[in-house]
Image (cartoon, grey):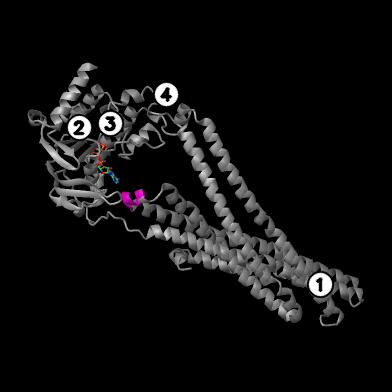
Amino acid sequence: MKELQHLNKYFLKYKSHLIIGSIITVVARIFLLFTPRYVKEIFVTIERYADNLITKEAFKAELTTAILYIIGAAVIAGILTFFMRQTIINVSRYIEYDLKNEIYAHYQKLSSNFYKKNRTGDLMNRISEDVGRVRMYAGPALMYSINTITLFTIVLIYMFSAAPKLALFTIAPLPILSVVIYRLSRKIHKRSTTVQQYLSKLSTYTQESFSGISVIKAYGIEPLTAVNFKQLSATSKEKQIHLAKVQALFFPMMILLIGASNLLVIYIGGMQYINGEIESLGTIAEFIIYVNMLTWPVATVGWVTSIVQQAEASQKRINEFLKIEPEIKNMVANPTEITGDIAFNNVSFTYDDTNIQALKNVSFTIKAGETLAILGKTGSGKSTILDLVGRLYDVDAGSITINGTEINKLNLTDLRNSIGYVPQDAFLFSDSIKNNIKFGKEDATDADVIKAAKNAQVHNNIIKFNNGYDTVLGERGITLSGGQKQRISIARAIIKSPKILLFDDCLSAVDTETEEQILKNLNTLSKGKTTIIVSHRVSSAKNADKIIVLEKGQIVQQGNHDTLLAAKGYYKNLYLKQKSETAHK
Ligand SMILES: Nc1ncnc2c1ncn2[C@@H]1O[C@H](COP(=O)(O)OP(=O)(O)OP(=O)(O)O)[C@@H](O)[C@H]1O
C-alpha cells in the first residue's frame, strides 16, 4: 500500500464526498436488512394463524404491514444505493481525472532524454490503463469494502443474537469462498494482462501496416503481412479462450458455495427446529436470505484484494515516472527579457545515451538582429547547436549566453517563447491548416495567418485546396508534399514574430526559386530578429551576416560569403559544386 499513499492527497481533497458516501452506504445496508427480519415475521404470523392463535383479520393486517415494510425498505435502500454509487464512484472518476492531469503535466516538464529512453506506448499505458486500474481502487474497491464491513457487522450481530449455533455453521464456508475468489481473480488478472499485451501487439502491427501501406504495396509483401497478422491474431484468440476458461469458473464457484451454505442452513436449522432450539421456521428463511446477502460481499473480499494489488503495481509504475526530475529546469521565477545577442563560448556537448560528442569547443557570437548560417556535412552537429539555443539540453563544458546572461539563468518559458523553431522534419497536427499555423500564436487573426502563409510562400498552394485554410491535415485529411509541410511549418514560426528564429534545414524540400523568395521575405521579416539557418545549400547561407562551417562538431571555417569564397575549403568547394549542378539543370 506504500505506492498508493500517493492518492491520499486526493482522498483528502474529496473527503466530504467520501464521508457522505460512506454514511449513505451504511444507511442503505441497514434498510436492506429489513427484508430478512420481516420475512421471518411473516413466517411467524403464518405459524400463529395456522395454530389459530390470531384471527383472520389480525393475520391479514400483520401480513400487509410486513409486506409494506419490506417494499418500503427495498425502495429506500435502492434510492440510497443509487446515491452511494453517485458519490463514491464519482469521486473515483474525479481522482482519475486529477491523476491523469498530474501525469500529463509532469510528462510535459520532462526533457527530451526522457522521451528517448521511454517508448511512447509505455507512456500512454501509464496514463491510461494504469490510471484506470488505480481508479478501481479509489472507487469500487473502497465502496465494496465499506459495503462488506457494514453488512458483515450488522448481519453477524443479527445472526448471533437470533441463533448463535446456526450462525456459526452458516458463515463457516464463507472464508473458503473468499479465498477461492481471490485465487480466481488473480488468475483472471494474469491472463487478461496477457490478452491485453497481445491485443496491443495486434493493434500496433495493424496500425503500422496501414500507415506503411504504400511501402508494403511497392514491395509486394501483402501476403507476408497477411500471414504475420493471422499468426498474431491466432495467438491472441488462444489467449482469449484461455482467459474465458477461468472467467467461466467464477459464477459456478459462487453458485456452488452459496448452494452449500443454503443446504447447511436448512440442515442445521431443520435439526435445531426439531430439537426446539429455534422457535420458528422463519429463522431458517431469515438465515437463507442472510447467506445470500453475504455471499457477494464475501466474494468481493477476494476481488477487492486483487484490485488493490493491481492498483499498487500500477501506481508504482506511475510513481516511477512522477519521481523523475526534469533534467532541464527553470531556475528563474522572474520574467527575463530576451533581446537576441547569442554567444557560444567554448561549448562542448555529448549525448549521454549514445556517448557521441556532437560539439567540441564551439565558439561564435551573433548580435541581435543578425543572421548566422551553419553549414557542414551530415552529423557534424548543426542541429545540436539549435537544440542548445532552445535549451533542450544543457552544455557539458563552456557556456552559452543570451544578452550576456548564461542560458540557464534565464526564465525558461520566456526563452522558449521568444524562439520560433522550424525543425528538420516538419510536424503538423491532424487539424486544419489554419490551426496548424496559429499554433505559434493562439490569438492570431485570419489576416495574420494569411500574411504568414504568404511570407512562407505557401498561400497559393493552400487556396487551391477545396477547403482552403480549413483543410484538415493528417490521417483523415489531405496529405501534403514535403515542401508544403516545410513551408507551413515556417509560417507557424514566423507568425509568432519571435526574437530568435531557428531554421533547421527546412528549405531542403523546396525548389531553389521558392527558397530564394522565402529567404527574401525572411530578410524583411527578420529585421531586428536573430536568425540561425542550418542548411546544406550555399544558396540559403550566402546572404547571412556570418557563416560557420562545422566538421565533426568543430568549427572549421568562419566568415561571410565573400571571405569564405576567397579562402580554400569546404564552403568554396560546396559553392562551386552546387553552382555547376544548377548550371546543368
Ligand atoms: N538525440 C540524439 N541522441 C543521441 N545522439 C544524437 C542525437 N541527435 C544527434 N545525435 C548525434 O550527434 C551527432 C550530431 O548530430 P546533429 O543532428 O547535430 O547533426 P547535423 O549536422 O544536424 O546532421 P544532419 O545534417 O544530418 O541533420 C550525430 O553523430 C548524431 O548521431
> What segment carries the magenta color?
110-116
Q: Earlier in the sequence, mark 3 or mark 1?
A: 1
> Could you give the CA–CA distance between mark 3 and mark 1, rounded to whole angstroms?
85 Å
Q: Is residue 112 magenta?
A: yes
Residue bearing the label numbered 2: 525
Relative horizontal placement of residue 81, taking residue 453 as reference (left or right): right
Relative horizontal placement of residue 148, taking residue 480 as reference (left or right): right
2 vs 1, front mark: 1
Q: Which amino acid, mark 2?
A: Leu
Relative horizontal placement of residue 294, taking residue 534 as reference (left or right): right
Query: Which x, y percent locates residue 527?
Result: 16, 34
> Could you give the CA–CA distance between mark 2 and mark 4, rounded to whole angstroms?
29 Å
Residue bearing the label numbered 4: 466
> Could you give the CA–CA distance between mark 2 and mark 1, rounded to whole angstroms?
91 Å
Residue drawn at x 25%, y 28% is 455
Q: Residues within 10 Å of mark 1 (few under 14, many from 20)?
A: some
Main SS of the magenta part reads helix
Above or below 354: residue 475: above
Helix, strand or loop status at disc 4: loop
Q: Residue furthest top?
A: 584
Q: Which amino acid, mark 4?
A: Asn
Q: Is residue 176 visible to the viewer in this orientation of the structure? A: yes
Residue bearing the label numbered 3: 452
Relative horizontal placement of residue 478, taking residue 48 as reference (left or right): left
Residue drawn at x 49%, y 38% is 207
1 vs 4, front mark: 1
Q: Pick whichever, 402 or 526, lies toward us.
A: 402
Residue drawn at x 63%, y 52% is 242
Mark count: 4
Q: Residues within 10 Å of mark 3 (few under 14, many from 20)?
A: many
